[in-house]
Image: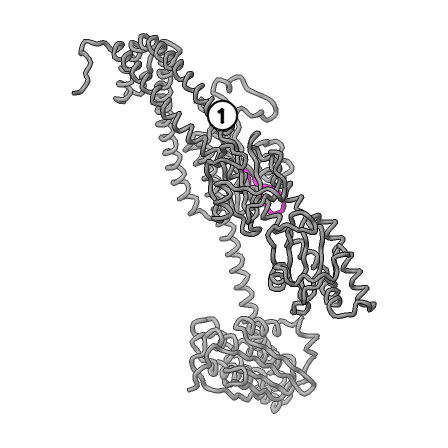
Amino acid sequence: MRFRLPGSWTIRNRLLLYCVFIVAFTAIAISIVTAVLVSRDAHDRVVGQLKSVATLKQQEVDSWVGGLGLNLDIVLSAEEISADLHTLTQAAPTSAAYQAAHARVLRRFTWAANRMGLFEELFFMGPKGEVLLSTERGHERQQLGLNDYFTEGMRHQFIQEPSYSLSLNKMTVVASRPVTYHGASIGVLAGRANLESLNALMVGRAGLGQTGETYLIGSNHRLLTDLRRPGYSIPDTYIRTAGSTQAVDGTRSGFATYQNYAGVTVIGVYKWIPGLKVGLLAEQGEAEALHATQLALWTAAGVALVAALLAILVGIVLIHSIVRPLSELGDTASQIADGDLDLDAPVRRNDEIGKLAHAFNRMTHRLRDLVRSLEKRTHHLRAINEAGRQISSILDLDELLPYVASSLLRTFDYDSVRILLLTEEGSAQLLSCSRGATEERREMEVADLGRLPAVASVVRTGEPLLENEPPREGGQTSQEEPEKGSLSEIAVPIRVGASLAGVLDITSRGPHPLDEQDLFAITTLADQLAIAVENTRLYQNAHELAAAKERQRLARDLHDAVSQTLFSVSLMAEVLPRIYERDPEQGRQRLEELRQLTRGALAEMRMLLLELRPAALAETSLPDLLRQLSEAVVGQARIPVELDVDSMRGLPPDVAVAMYRIAQEALNNVVKHARAERVLVNLRDGHDDGGALLELVITDDGCGFDVAAASSGRLGLGIMAERAESIEARLELSSSDDGTCVRAVWRPWTPPLPI
């Protein structure tokens, strides 16, 4: 059966009944759940605190145990200590070497024991267990070979569990480790620990109240550290509780509620520490641990009752005052939800209903602003996209910068645009463009940017700047400008990589000041402008580099070519008639020379025409190129050229052209400088110890030259070196009074195939 209220009940009565029911039910449920959860949480919190304390104490004990082994390592860290200990095991006690080693080791042991404070005694046992040296001189020559810290210490580092010493009448811990010399074990270094430091670690307060304490017990339940309650002495006290039994006998860790050694109910956490073979217990009285929780529960119950009564009273008052304005606000909210964003909810009061009305009004305002912002951003993105397409297609700065400035003025309705480009010489180029005025270009120094504060700030800091109502240049303000709106300015850096290439600065005076969206749009355009500026500079550099390379290639390829031969022909043709009139026989000889020069010029012209067609030059085989080149030299200089070449195929075109250029420069040098009577051109492909190779050798019997003096100053030698380097070939040049030899060797990945 479902409970149903009478239909005639008003909203006020319904709200009042619901309020009473909800407050009462909630208060009771929360009180019950809180009591259960808080009690459980309090117990868990106490256990957690005890676990934290026990873990901290365990870490301190482990650190103390680790410190014992570390201090033994420090004792043996000196370079001479192992040698001195070896001397103690080998030399006679009365020998000088034994006495000197004994004194040095004793000083080391005494220093370590006093400096580190962990050991009451440090001693060294020989391979048979005899104490050869000890900081307690009376213990020397004792036989300790049956002790665990000797037998185990001969094999590895060992910590003996706490034990009672009859001679010392106290609990001790002995740490030991083997001592080696040249890889062989020569004895055991041991240290008897001072348990006062361990006792101080456990007795130290850890925030466990008046009844909380931590202590250690041995594997036989013997007490190892002091207790807070008097009357329990070490080592006469044995602890047998539920916690100690689990820790020592069961070698387990956990927590439980039990009666401690004094019969008091405690919450305890127990741990087994295997490194020292001891049990660690952290305990706190249950009454003290849960006292604050029980008090808090009673307090919370009283507060909950009072709060429930107050809530009911407040609900009665508020219900009456809320119903009517809620109805009005509901009607307004419905109209706003239907899409009437220009409607504002009436605000009749300053309470929560008024805040709710204000919230509705802010919501509608934000929606209107969001719509306008989206429209503005869409307009900006469309304009940026269009400008980006145009910017990327313009490679001339004189055309690019005015286009960008006019686009910003036209698209975004700004008042002025300035584009500043920095040059490598430290100056700057400034383009200024404003609405209704012509653009202005001028050169200026970076130091003169003080007249443009925003631009100067970006140049100085490299950070974008957005300002509203910045100080005007010259401090003058017209009478009409305030009516147009406040002045806003944005200046953003134009970056090419990590360097600053310029600044894009815009100003606007209108009813709406510039904002972050304008900054985003201008920054995006500045990034696109930076890419365009860099593309323009790269385009110009590429043109200049291509022109320079072309000039170098023409200078290299036309060096000592047809021009010299034609010049010789021209000179001979001028003097030939006079020679023939004076001596016909000599004239015929000169005429024959003219014929040979003309033939050589013709051959050179063929070579030049071939070179002017790079594709034809690359398609011609290297042997054919060398034959044509030899004929040109014979015709030009009348020097016999003996050609010995192997026919081959499969040679890469760039290698063939480079070898041809090297031969061309070498023969040109022979013609101009060598005064040779015979030239040999040899081209062969073969193998040597380094693998397959292609070898070009050009030798002459001329006068030779000083290779060291000429290699850095002659254009022809530089051209040959460049050609060889371009195909990773080795160029060798040797010269003497008997002639000159040019040798170029190229090692292919795979050898060319002979025909």
Q: Position of residue 279 (x, y in %)?
A: 54, 46
> Magenta segment range?
419-430
| Residue occupying the far bottom of the picture | 585
What residue sits 48% from the left and 83% below the top?
623
Q: Where is residue 270 in the image (x, y as percent from the top left)?
A: 50, 42
Residue 144, relative to residue 602: is it above or below?
Answer: above
Q: How crowded is mark 1: few (under 14 residues within 10 Å), some or many (20 or more)?
A: few
Of residue 201 and residue 171, the one placed in the foreground of this image is 171
Q: Does the magenta stretch include residue 429?
A: yes
Q: Where is residue 722 in the image (x, y as percent from the top left)?
A: 57, 71
Magenta segment, prevailing SS (helix, strand or loop) = strand
Q: Pointer 1: what residue?
A: 291
Residue 286, relative to residue 484: is it above or below?
Answer: below
Q: Does the magenta stretch include residue 381?
A: no
Marks counted in the figure total 1
What residue sits 45% from the left and 80% below the top?
621
Of residue 157 and residue 603, the one placed in the foreground of this image is 157
Q: In which quarter of the image is the C terminus?
A: bottom left
Q: Where is residue 562 in the image (x, y as percent from the top left)?
A: 55, 75
Residue 434, relative to residue 18: is it above or below?
Answer: below
Q: Is residue 490 visible?
A: no
Disc 1 on helix, strand or loop?
A: helix
Q: Which colour scheme is used?
A: one colour
**What type is the residue that disc 1 sits on?**
His
Q: Can residue 204 be seen in this view?
A: yes
Q: In which quarter of the image is the N terminus?
A: top left
